[in-house]
Image: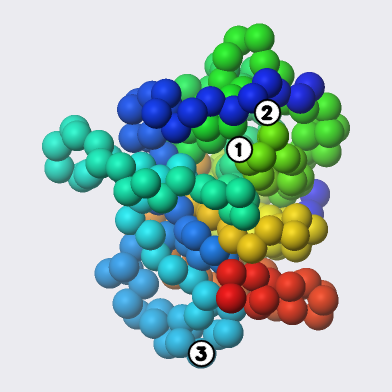
Amino acid sequence: SRPSPSSGPISEDSISPAAMASTEPACQRLEMDVDVDAADAHNNLFRVHPFLRKVRIQPFGIIGMRKPKEGSKLFDTREWPDQGTVVVDPTCVQALQSSSPGSITDGASAAIYQFIGINTPDKVFPVDVLDTVRNEFDALYHLYNSRHVIHVAVPSFNTGEWAQDDSTVMEAVAAVYIAVLKEFCRTGCTRLRMPTIGTGEQCPESLRGKMPSFILGALAAAFEDLTPIEKRRLMRAGS
């Protein structure tokens, strides 16, 4: 492989603290969160690459909440995704194809599903999502009432063909971002909010310190793989 409609969305105030606390940091506009210290050695890439100059590090989760490292209290940045923002759901094929959205109770996906109102046992993923996101690196944009989501199937970096070496991991991370960016270009929206890819449970301990640099390199590589029209659309977004 290459490297049913929901009911109305719930209100922000009804989103559970557990779901919000479990989200990964995210990006806004064409931006994403990476560890600031780990990215210091790659600041030149930020400065010289035109696409990465649009990246803004954010201290909150995918739907605007972040649990502090110390203590258990949540704070609300009120940076909720607006109607021009697409959020990225980094899921796995098995979870999407064999589970209901309501059975996924942890991570960024759980918070997103609650935010768009499909986190109850009676809900199912839309047919077009199930038909399209069937293999690793598949991605599809879907509009849930007024809320925009790109579902993308992220591979595991612990086992299998994408866990072989650093270059393989970089290729896989770039392939995920290529799929997401191509879908975003079709939406007509102006902002993209993405969690970091490959930094969760699917990332082995041996790679954790390397992932920030992989992410920046993969984003740059993904941008270069797009068509000229897609590149122009991305560079105009969020301007």
Q: Amino acid at mark 3?
A: Val
Q: Secondary structure at mark 2?
A: helix
Furthest residue to the left?
71
Label 3 sits on residue: 48
Q: Residue at x 34, y 35 (%)?
A: 21
User: In the image, what residue occupies the spot 59% across and 53% down?
Assistant: 85
* Along the line of sight, the residue nearer the viewer: 102 or 199: 102
- Residue 134 visible? The answer is no
Residue position marked by numbered label 2 in the rendering:
96
Tell me the number on the disc at residue 91.
1
Marks 1 and 3, Cα distance to the nearest angstrom?
31 Å
Horizontal and vertical percent position of residue 203: 46, 47
Spatial separation of the CA atoms under disc 2 and disc 1: 7 Å
The kind of residue on which mark 1 rests is: Thr
Q: CA distance from mark 3 to mark 2?
A: 38 Å
Count numbered badges in the picture.
3
